Image (cartoon, rainbow, N blue to C red):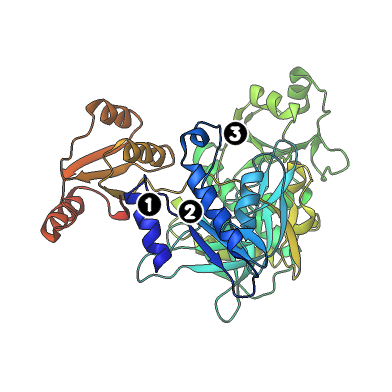
């Protein structure tokens, strides 16, 4: 209690010279040590000493433990130290997949595993509990050049129900919400061949719908870079469409496909194909393919997405794709354990590579420095009580630069520099300033009622 009182006194009376010396029972000491401590405290406030270039002169609290003088405020914090030092060098640590959410992130020339930041984890709304899918396998979709979106298979719930779900990237855990994820229950466990085949049928179904909507009966469509398994599925679902298949990989060329040399010119490529081709669909997974750019120059490129947000029943579509895949499994795919991903090139994660997350041991993840990006929501309101000073405005600017949009500033005077308000509005923020006495319940309730009527729900309150 005395120590806490002393801390409060120092903040209110900065001219006060106050120091607490804690001595444990097992420590042997004499009066000389206490006298020396007092003299150091006395000399630290002398004019001669204050003029010396000392960064820190007086510690408010000291502790003598087993003949070693320690500073209680200095506590070893390995986690914070690692995050700070990760700004300068690569730091890794071992985590358990059963306890930690791990994501795959590409760097300039390799992949790395990262622990999802605790401050960015999604919290369930009051009265609603989001489900969590423990991922066992994940595979990129056939048309993706990067590492997402991906199809995941795993278990969820107390009964470990096997489900399929979409994720934005490869990860060990997916938070299932009503608004952003389509899932379907399937008999499990799911073989790797069936998981890859599900992506074939899913892409084929969406691509067929897209092509039927834009092409006529006389238009031929060139499908470039599809694997033999993907071609087989497209042929079964291509009723009413004229499809021509081509590839630049001679070793992986399917029967009936046209081979294009990687150094072929645009003119020679045109001569390879029959007339009437109007559209081209790129299903290759190479990121620096020159043939792709030449095909886009010759034909109109068709882009599509397997994002099920616009589908009336995305879960039903996923269920039908899995049912069709169970009757025609894929034969071409590779498997990479999650712990082997660090150091591999981003291209190694492309379709049809399956990431195996079913690991019972620990895996190494790269420690990341703290980044405020994504910490705040542009769809929520943040109430800043008494923060109209320079410090408060600096905090508000940082919040806006990291995702916040609606901010309410309150104080007894409610005087804020108009130039600063204009700068924040230029950044896209909506700033409201209100007079409020935080010690009066009626004043606080009045401001809260205004926020409820005119702004999004309050996500956080800061009082200074």
- Name the residue located 80 percent from the left edge and 42 percent from the top edge: 256
The image quadrant of residue 395 is top left
Closer to viewer: mark 3 or mark 2: 2
- Name the residue located 76 percent from the left edge and 49 percent from the top edge: 342
Residue 266 placed where, x, y %? 74, 20
Residue closer to the observer: 290 or 177: 177
The span from disc 2 to disc 1 (Cα, nearest Å) is 9 Å
Q: Is residue 366 visible?
A: yes
Residue 5 placed where, x, y %? 36, 62
Most distant residue in the right direction: 251
The image quadrant of residue 426 is top left
Total labels: the figure holds: 3
Mark 3 or mark 2, earlier in chain: 2
Closer to viewer: mark 3 or mark 1: 1
The span from disc 3 to disc 2 (Cα, nearest Å) is 82 Å
Q: Which residue is mark 1?
A: 10
Indicate left or right for 360 with 39 as reference: right
Q: Which residue is mark 2?
A: 60
**For the residues bearing labels 2 and 1, Cβ distance under 8 angstroms:** yes
Q: Which residue is mark 3?
A: 219
Residue closer to the observer: 262 or 236: 262
Categorize mark 2 by other alpha carbons within 10 Å: few (<14), some (14-19), many (20+): some
Mark 2: which secondary structure? loop
Categorize mark 3 by other alpha carbons within 10 Å: few (<14), some (14-19), many (20+): some
**For the residues bearing labels 3 and 1, Cβ distance under 8 angstroms:** no
Categorize mark 1 by other alpha carbons within 10 Å: few (<14), some (14-19), many (20+): some
Indicate left or right for 95 with 62 as reference: right
């Amino acid at each position: 209690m005395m120590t806490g009182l002393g801390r409060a006194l120092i903040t209110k009376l900065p001219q006060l010279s106050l120091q607490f010396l804690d001595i444990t029972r097992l420590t042997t000491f004499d009066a000389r040590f206490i006298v020396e401590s007092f003299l150091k405290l006395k000399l630290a406030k002398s004019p001669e000493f204050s003029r010396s270039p000392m960064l820190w002169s007086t510690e408010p609290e000291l502790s003598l433990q087993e003949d070693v003088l320690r500073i209680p405020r200095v506590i070893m914090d390995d986690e914070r130290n690692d995050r700070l030092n990760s700004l300068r060098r690569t730091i890794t640590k071992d985590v358990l997949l059963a306890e930690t959410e791990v994501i795959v992130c590409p760097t300039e020339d390799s992949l790395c595993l990262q622990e999802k930041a605790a401050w960015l984890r999604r919290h369930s709304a009051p009265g609603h509990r989001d489900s969590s899918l423990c991922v066992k396998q994940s595979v990129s979709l056939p048309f993706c050049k990067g590492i997402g979106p991906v199809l995941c298979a795993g278990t969820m719930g107390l009964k470990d129900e096997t489900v399929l779900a979409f994720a934005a990237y490869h990860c060990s855990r997916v938070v299932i919400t009503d608004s952003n994820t389509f899932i379907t229950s399937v008999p499990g466990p799911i073989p790797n061949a069936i998981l890859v085949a599900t992506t074939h049928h899913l892409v084929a179904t969406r691509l067929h719908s897209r092509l039927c909507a834009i092409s006529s009966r006389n238009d031929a469509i060139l499908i470039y870079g599809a694997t033999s398994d993907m071609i087989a599925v497209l042929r079964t679902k291509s009723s009413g469409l004229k499809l021509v298949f081509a590839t630049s990989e001679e070793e992986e060329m399917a029967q009936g496909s046209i081979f294009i040399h990687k150094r072929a010119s645009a003119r020679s490529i045109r001569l390879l194909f029959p007339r009437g081709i109007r559209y081209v669909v790129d299903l290759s997974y190479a990121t620096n393919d020159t043939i792709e750019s030449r095909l886009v120059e010759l034909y109109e490129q068709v882009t599509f997405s397997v994002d099920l947000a616009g589908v009336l029943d995305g879960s039903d579509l996923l269920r039908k794709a899995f049912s069709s895949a169970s009757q025609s499994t894929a034969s071409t795919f590779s498997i990479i354990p999650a712990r082997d991903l660090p150091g591999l090139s981003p291209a190694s994660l492309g379709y049809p590579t399956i990431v195996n997350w079913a690991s019972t041991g620990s895996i190494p993840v790269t420690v990341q420095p703290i980044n405020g990006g994504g910490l705040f929501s542009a769809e929520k309101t943040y109430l800043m009580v008494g923060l109209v000073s320079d410090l408060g405005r600096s905090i508000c600017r940082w919040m806006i630069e990291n995702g916040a949009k609606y901010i309410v500033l309150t104080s007894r005077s409610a005087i804020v520099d108009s130039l600063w308000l204009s700068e924040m509005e230029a950044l896209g923020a909506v700033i409201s300033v209100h007079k409020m006495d935080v010690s009066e319940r009626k004043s606080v309730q009045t401001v809260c009622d205004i926020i409820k009527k005119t702004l999004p729900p309050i996500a956080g309150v800061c009082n200074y």
